Image: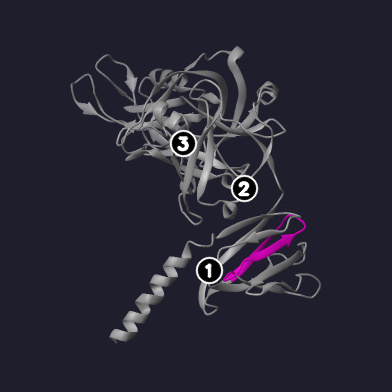
Amino acid sequence: MVLTAAVAALIVTVYLTYWNKIPSTIKIRAGVEQELDFRVPVSGKIYRVREEDSAPVSSVKGAEDKGRKAVESLSGSVESIPVNFAHTVKVRANEIDTYQMDLKLFGVIPYKNVDVEVIQDKMLIPSGIPIGIYVKTSGVLVVGIGEFENSEGKKISPAKYALQKGDYILKVNGEVMENKKHFVQTVEESEGQDLVLTIKRNGEVTDVMVTPGANQNQEWKLGIWIRDNAQGIGTMTYEDTDNSFGALGHGINDVDTSLLMNLEEGTLYRTEIVGITRGSNGNPGELTGYIEYDSDNVIGEIKENTEEGIFGICDAEVEAASAFEPIPIALKQEITLGPAQIICSVTGEPEFYDVEIVEVNLERDNINRGIVVQVVDEKLLTLTGGIIQGMSGSPIIQNGKLVGAVTHVLVQDSTKGYGIFIEEMLGH
């Protein structure tokens, strides 16, 4: 029994050790032969997800001790191709498509099913410019439920059992709520009559009924805190040749609920960095920007607010003024530990600063923390102490390719920060 338990414990340990070595989704470029060099004792087969619709994988090659040997193509009557990641595997697919791999550890123990996505190769313009951000919520966001005293001095909370923190109030008695002011006015004009609120909660729309209460000033209230917009600064990660952009590398979350804000509309503004608060261990620093929220300073429109960042269309003048040329993207399996650079504008203009990629987490659940970088550039360390707030979205460059974007600072070590893979931003 002891021997059996020891063997089982060893198997579990080995299994967990190898689990994160191969991601659950692998992306490869169409029309380009690429190496998958995981060096894990895992083997299996690759096959089409939809055979009737799919284009064939041109070839898969496995590296053997005495060179490379071609393996049968996935075409014609061939259902699948064997792969062995104990060696370097070369793969090529000619067209955009989706495949799957069934893998086993040591060829025996079920390991995982891996999705293989063939994507179009991409060239992007790394940016690194500071941006002012304004977003308006779709509906009025409830950020808290409270209570107040009525005319009799009794504490009441009319919305306590009807609304929840994180709800979006879309309509009142069928009337669309344009903003926070509109909602407050509608409640005040209710004169205490029941209100039917159309709300969005956890992605589902439903109706709830609430009866306002009068405070000591005879004003009709629901006893909730609400918000309808958010502002801040960040860094643009990339621009595409069609004037689309990606920025931040993480979504805009409400500061009180920590939930991703539902976006109705958003605007990018030209901003100027006017101050730097250096970071230190336990105390994250920040960039302070000056933003004039007028039409003359608008440089783009935010279309999406997602966990992977904010995305939209920037003005043509932004691309025209870019300091950099388009460069290839790096897929996550191509990233290596070692020297890299980030681009940010702490001195007013985008500049390259040296960093080290110290961790690459291919299978991390938190998509915004797949990369860990450490600042080694003495100039940047002197200016900022490392990674600070406002640098979110700073492009990470390695070997002339766009790897991803900085997303967060490690609070206990300001010289280090997390990053997101660029393929995650492009796949939002």
Whole-number angstrom distance, CA of label 1 to CA of label 3: 50 Å
Residue 2 in the image, given as x and y percentages of width and height = 28, 85
Q: CA distance from mark 1 to mark 2?
A: 21 Å
Going by the numbered disc 3, the residue's amino acid type is Ile
412 and 109: which one is in front?
412
Q: Closer to the camera, 177 or 128?
A: 128
* Residue with the most extreme right position: 76
Image quadrant occupied by the C terminus: top right
Q: Amino acid at mark 1?
A: Val
- Quarter of the rendering containing residue 312: top right
Residue 330: numbered disc: 2
**Magenta residues, start to end:** 85-102
Q: Tell me the crowding category of disc 2: few under 14, some 14 to 19, or many 20 or more residues within 10 angstroms, Cα based.
A: many
- Disc 2 versus disc 3: distance between alpha carbons? 42 Å
**Could you tell me what secondary structure mostly forms the magenta stretch?**
strand
Query: Height in image: 232 above or below 58?
Result: above
Q: For the image shown, how many numbered marks are present on the structure?
A: 3
Residue at figure coordinates x 57%, y 24% from the top left: 267
Residue wearing tag 1: 40
Q: Secondary structure at mark 2?
A: loop
User: What residue is pinned by disc 3?
Assistant: 199
Q: Does residue 250 show up?
A: no
Does dot 3 land on a helix, a strand or a loop? strand
Looking at the image, residue 66 lies above or below residue 427:
below
Residue 264's image quarter? top right
Residue farthest left in this picture: 153
What is the secondary structure assignment of the residue under circle 1?
loop
Residue 83 is left or right of residue 380, and the answer is right
> Looking at the image, is mark 1 or mark 3 nearer the viewer?
1
